[in-house]
Image: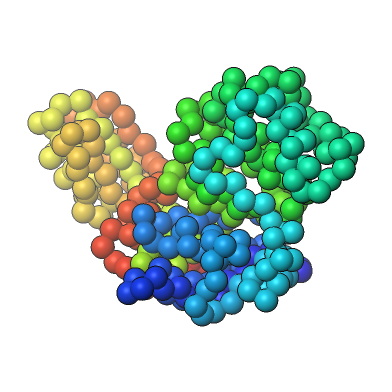
Amino acid sequence: MGEPAIVAEGLRKRYGGTTALDGIDLEVPAGTVHGLLGPNGSGKTTTVRVLTTLTRPDGGRARIAGHDVVREAVRVRTRIGLVGQHAAVDEVLGGRQNLVMFGRLYHLGIRAARRRADELLERFGLDGTGDRPAGTYSGGMRRRLDLAASMILAPPVLFLDEPTTGLDPRGRTEVWDAVRALAEGGTTVLLTTQYLDEADRLAAGISVLDGGRVIAAGTPERLKSALGGDRIDVVVREAADLPRAAAIITRTTGADADTDAETLRAGAPVTDRVAALTATVRELDEAGIAVADIGLRRPTLDEVFLHLTGGRQGERQEVPA
């Protein structure tokens, strides 16, 4: 295997008395999507700014597509695309006109720019709308046009900063499909997002940042497994039955059950998932407890995120890839 598309080692950055990055390490294999997660102020934006040569680090080093972000900043800029949180397209111009304009800004000849615009409109499912003003596009279409503009020169590495913020579910799905297609075509994507389900669906690897440090890293499944594997959850029909259901779950799983009075839910982690589920169903039935729902599930990435960032800060948890 060749060198990873993105490598960061001990990145540090301070703004006055504030430490934005406190020794960030990151490694992203070529042709994959990597999620960068963390609460506000965790260092996500500063990491992206350093990796895209917009900010110089105070310490450490980073390479993009084999080039140092400080010593070879100009080379790095020719190897990356960057899509910010807000659409960069001109809403008066048509989709094709926008892409031709970006092509000309990248010093393509007029014929080459038009040819590339048509290729990208087709690639991102916009070929039937190229003559419409971008202002008439849906949110998902505008973001796909943004992605197309970032790919004018077919950069091997693409940075996406919260690309689906403000989109409805359909628009988010459209952007997800486009990102998957880019990765399948060999583009490396670094994705920052506030949507945990987005990272879960798209990313092969995830780094969780807090306090300017990577506090956990691994695949989504490994991160979820590290929280405790499978859980059994029971939703009862009557609030009065919730304590009894919790007691049964504690007995059948051997773990203290947690409860949520608002959702009438009780649950606990399990080791022998089938045996625990069978015993729980039997005991609930024998106790005459009416159940609205029961099932086994993995912890969500939201739960992992809250567990990792909900009180601890700074100490990295290495999760096997």
Q: Quadrant of the N terminus?
A: bottom right
For the point 21% across and 53% down, the residue is: 256
The image shows residue 5, relative to residue 59, as above or below, that is above
Hey, which quadrant is residue 122 in on the image?
A: top right
Observer-nearest of 253 and 131: 131
For the point 47% across and 58% down, the residue is: 45
- Residue 218 shows in this picture: no
Q: Quadrant of the C terminus?
A: bottom right
Count of picture labels: 0
Observer-nearest of 270 and 73: 73
The image shows residue 194, relative to residue 188, as above or below, that is above
Observer-nearest of 60 and 107: 107
On the image, the x and y values in percent for residue 127 come to: 76, 24
Residue farthest to the bottom, as pictured: 59
On the image, the x and y values in percent for residue 46 come to: 48, 62
Please indicate whether residue 166 sits to the left or right of residue 307 in the image. Answer: right
Please indicate whether residue 105 sits to the left or right of residue 239 in the image. Answer: right
Color scheme of the displayed model = rainbow
On the image, the x and y values in percent for residue 48 come to: 54, 60
